[in-house]
Amino acid sequence: MSQLTTHILDTSKGKPAAGITVILFQQHNNEWGNIAAGKTNSDGRIPDLLQAESVLSSGTYKLRFETKTYFDNQNIQSFYPFVEIVFFISDASHYHVPLLLNPFGYSTYRGS
């Protein structure tokens, strides 16, 4: 399993959100560098965002979820064209960053 995983639940439907592009960035000084990308599967997950043996160094990262296309494809008006979640990785343990999403709001937490 990847050190970093994510999943998206569309809370307006109570179902996983499939087909959303997710991009991982790492912060260096005041710049963000793109280090990985993937698309959520039918279960709303990206199990292999990083290779299984990859370990991220300690630092600040962000996941950018491209939500506009997901809602546009369903002819649903939404407020947020994308969602960015910034977090800090301090060790080699597993980090799970879920996104609970609806057209006019979102929330997140550190999962397990």
Image: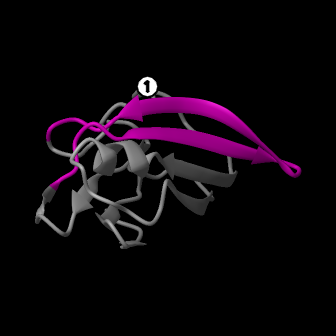
> Residue 58: x and y, percent?
68, 51
Q: Position of residue 2 (x, y in %)?
A: 39, 37
Query: In what quadrant of the picture does the C terminus appear?
Result: bottom left
Residue 43 relative to residue 85: left or right: left
**What is the chief secondary structure element of the magenta stretch?**
strand
**Would you identify the image quadrant in which residue 12 lies?**
bottom left
Residues 90 and 45: in front is 45
Does dot 1 land on a helix, a strand or a loop?
loop
**What span is in magenta?**
16-42
- The x, y position of residue 42, in whole percent, is 15, 38
Q: Image height check: is 35 above or below 6? A: above
User: What amino acid is found at the position of numbered circle 1 in the picture?
Assistant: Gln
Q: Given the current orientation, which residue lies at the most extreme right position?
A: 29
Asked whether residue 106 is drawn in magenta, I would say: no
The N terminus, quarter of image: top left
Residue drawn at the location 52% of the way across and 39% of the way down: 23
Q: Which residue is mark 1?
A: 51
Colour convention:
one colour
